[in-house]
Image (cartoon, rainbow, N blue to C red):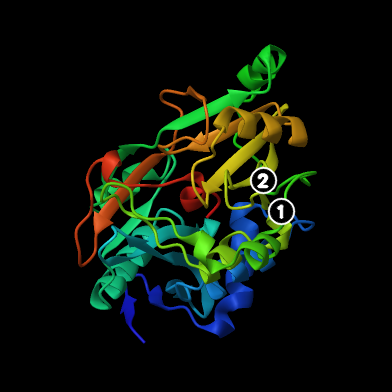
Amino acid sequence: MSTTSGGDGVLVRDYEPADEPGVLELMRTCLGWRAEDPNEAFFRWKHQENPFGTSPAWVAVDQGQIVGFRAFLRWEFTDGERVVRAVRAVDTATAASHRGRGIFRRLTEHGLAAVRAEGVDLVFNTPNDQSRPGYLRMGWRVVGRLPVAMRPRGLRSLVTVARARQAAEIWSQPSPIGVPVDEWLDRVGPAAVHDPARDGQLVTRRTEEFLRWRYGMPDLQYRIVWTGADPTRGTLVLRVRRRGPAQEAAILDQLAGVPADGRRTLGSVLRGTGADYAIWLGGQRPGPMLPLPGQGPILTARAASGSVPDRIPGWGLRLGDVELF
């Protein structure tokens, strides 16, 4: 176990399974988790069930009490020729009594040293405006803003969309269309999950095991949809969620080829879900959509033991690669 200790007596060390109750309580307090939400199950799904591996994580301890937490979610990319091992900087929390003492930085720099030593190639995330400056001071670089596009259900829905300025809710609404990912994979087989790298871009290394994990958590209510009789054509992953007064059909991924008729596919999604609009992140849109300049998340990254594409065109990310975590 690696540890570091500051002059203030706070010890930074590797997270252990016995730390889970203290970490969950810290997260509950710092992040305002609601008692009715399945946050504990989400935490375990994210960090313990990920087929890319258990998340490396660290705690800050003061006089036996956990006062800080930091986790990196394991991820794997491919450029069509090699596997790129990555981590995404995700969960972090510091007790109110210990804020302003550099614990976030100490945990993060300790974590960076640990993943660099094990040969992880890069670290990436999409921090908000408040946390981004801290990452930049630690060597992260802004890659750019990920492109976002939307398709309204109709002219009337544009008014609702214009008022939907809040962040989307984490937890989904039930979807009246589509099937769970396990049902779709059992029907089409593993050959349908292949998603080749696009022009040498880094894309998530999608496997059957990965898809069953990534889109299989029941509480997030992901659904697989397609148009026509062939479930391997026009296949999209979606979930329905609230964004202020609007209902949004978030299209997370495109699993088995571009829809033959993208307009029809998106129209069926909007009619079937009753959403005010559909939203998509990334290139190669699944149909005709309106770009939303300046609206996408800002991608940041830094090298660990490898190299990092420094422009958005080098990354083939979709909403399923960057949402939630």
Quarter of the image where one finds residue 205: bottom left
- Identify the residue at image location x=43%, y=38%: 297
Q: Is residue 249 left or right of residue 322?
A: right
Coordinates of residue 223 in the picture (x, y in percent):
68, 51
For the residue labelled by badge 2, is the local secondary structure a helix, a strand or a loop? strand
Quadrant of the image for the N terminus? bottom left
Coordinates of residue 201 in the picture (x, y in percent):
29, 49
Q: Which residue in the protein does label 2 denote?
A: 239
Coordinates of residue 206 in the picture (x, y in percent):
46, 62
Distance between mark 1 and mark 2 Cα atoms: 6 Å
Q: Type of residue at label 2?
A: Arg
Residue contact between numbered discs 1 and 2, judged by CB atoms under 8 Å? yes
For the residue labelled by badge 1, is the local secondary structure a helix, a strand or a loop? loop
Disc assigned to residue 160: none
Nearer to us in this view, 85 or 110: 85
Nearer to us in this view, 263 or 143: 263
- Identify the residue at image location x=71%, y=47%: 172
Quarter of the image where one finds residue 180: bottom right
Q: Which residue in the protein does label 1 denote?
A: 221
